[in-house]
Image (cartoon, grey):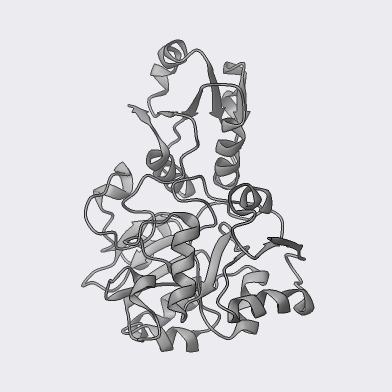
Amino acid sequence: MTKVLKIDPLNPDEESLKEAVKLLREGEVIVFPTETVYGIGADAYNEEACRKIFEIKGRPSDNPLIVHIGSLSQLKEIADNYEPYMDFLEKFWPGPLTVIFPKKSKKISPVVTAGLPTVAVRMPAHPVAQKLIEMFGHPIAAPSANLSGRPSATNAKHVVEDFMGRVKMILDAGNAPFGLESTIIDLSKDHPVLLRPGPVEVEKLKEIFPELVVPDFVRSGKFSGKPLAPGMKYRHYAPSKPLILVENLEKMEGILRKYPNHIVICVEERKDLYRKKIVVGSLKKPYSIAQNMFAALREAEKTEKEYIIVEGVEERGILFAVMNRLRKAASEIVR
């Protein structure tokens, strides 16, 4: 039985969170909101509890989890060699940024890190996540709260679709503000490497780290080998129907004819071009596109249409991250 508990996203009530904390201490798995997407979490120091996350999600064991912390003292417990980056961390934490450091503590099981010598760490900014970690007193290991390969959950309704009856509790705090998973940067190497684009834009990172490496797989969506961070190797974010991503919009007319039984996900500026469509946001407000994309994919798969056709967007700012997710989700890419 899953309990869905509504909670104020800005001023979470401690009494309401006590039951969630109790479940975490008992080694159970719960779902909670962050400012990026909802997370499915367990005690990061409890190996068996973390194994449950993989089982519940159907997540491959070589796909590491992100460890969510509430303070820099918790970072000190689990990571090494972070001291040179303190100014950077204080600039972006709390916030939608995950950083990979060498793992320090044996408290963090190889299950959490997928056997890697590194650990992915984030300090979330969402008041509910912050209060939950503070009251629990331990870091919480949590990937996105969706069945493996599915579009990420940006509200409790999505979580219920995937996990009702599978987890003990869902904390419902409404829509996730960003609607897109955190940026991941690897600071465990000789030079910084972007592993996943997200709300902390690559342009901002390059201002701080001019030497930042952006690997080809970040743009292409195709990665082979052992994943160094969540979301790298496997097909992710995919709806249950074929998704055709049209990056070259000059070819859109031909694609619409090729797949006549379709629904189009498009931006406000182009909505009049299509009959059956879902408008995901405006190019004038690119964060609206990021916030609504996963919800649009879930909405589109519920229609009677056989194919989901998505317009590509220019890879700038947050839209770079949107294109990363769409390429990972796509059955076909039209360039």
Residue 18 position in % (x across, y down)? 72, 79
Note whether residue 128 is visible: yes
Occupied quadrant, residue 297 = top right
Foreground residue among 62 and 7: 62
Looking at the image, residue 117 sits to the left or right of residue 287; the answer is left
Looking at the image, residue 140 sits to the left or right of residue 218; the answer is right
Occupied quadrant, residue 214 = bottom left
Residue 73 position in % (x across, y down)? 49, 89
Foreground residue among 217 and 45: 45
Residue found 66% across the figure and 80% down from its top: 22
Residue 224 position in % (x across, y down)? 23, 50
Residue 198 position in % (x across, y down)? 46, 55
Q: Is residue 123 above or below residue 229?
A: below
The mark total stands at: 0
Residue most extreme to the front: 1
Residue found 59% across the figure and 27% down from its top: 269
Foreground residue among 316 and 304: 304
